[in-house]
Amino acid sequence: MKGIYAGGDVAAVQGAIVHAIAAGRKAASSIDIALGGAGDIEEVLFERDVPSQYIGRDEGFASWPREKVPELELEARHQGFQEVALGFEDEQAKDTKSRIDTL
């Protein structure tokens, strides 16, 4: 149907993921043409840099103390359906982030 784009299990019998990906690429090309493009979906819009091999690595990472997430007091937990884990305060989140940024 004109203007309808579908693929994968919706458009055909269940099959391999490769067929769903191929259908998705075909749909993307058709949509590009419908919007006035050339149907070229191979165009690289963003060149990725090669990530550093050291990104996220720190020898002492496993032994870093974890920031404790504040929780609702035990007595208050029995009085309703409030969230138990209250989440980090802004300063706790910033401290955690700054430790990670120093890697």
Image (cartoon, rainbow, N blue to C red):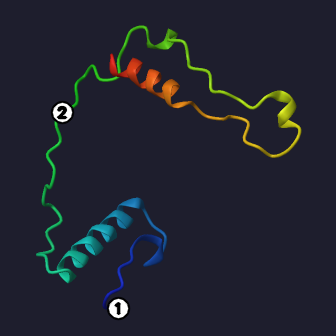
Crowding at dot 2, Cα within 10 Å, few <14 / some 14-19 / many 20+, comes out as few
83 with respect to 63 (left or right): right
Image quarter in which the C terminus is found:
top left
Please provide percent x and percent y for residue 58: 37, 13
The front one of 61 and 73 is 73
Q: Position of residue 33 (x, y in %)?
A: 17, 79
Q: In the image, which is nearer the foreground, mark 2 or mark 1?
A: 2
Q: Nearer the viewer, residue 16 or 103?
A: 103
> The residue under label 2 is which amino acid type?
Val
Q: Nearer the viewer, residue 90 or 56?
A: 90
* Residue occupying the point 33% across, 16% down: 102
Under circle 1, the secondary element is loop
Residue 103 higher or lower than 15, as above or below: above
Q: Which residue is mark 1?
A: 1
Q: Quadrant of the N terminus?
A: bottom left
- Give the residue drawn at x 43%, y 8%: 60
Helix, strand or loop for disc 2? loop
Amino acid type, mark 1: Met
Q: Which residue is painted at 29% across and 74% down in the image?
A: 27
**Residue 65 to residue 82: above or below:** above
Quadrant position of residue 77: top right
Q: Which mark is residue 24?
A: none
Position of residue 24 in the picture relative to residue 62 (left or right):
left
Q: Nearer the viewer, residue 26 or 14?
A: 26
Going from N to C along the chain, the mark reached first, 2 or 1, is 1
Q: Is residue 99 left or right of residue 49?
A: right
Question: Residue 50's mark?
Answer: 2
Which quarter of the picture shows residue 3?
Answer: bottom left
Q: Position of residue 88 (x, y in %)?
A: 57, 30
The Cα–Cα distance between marks 2 and 1, rounded to whole angstroms, is 42 Å
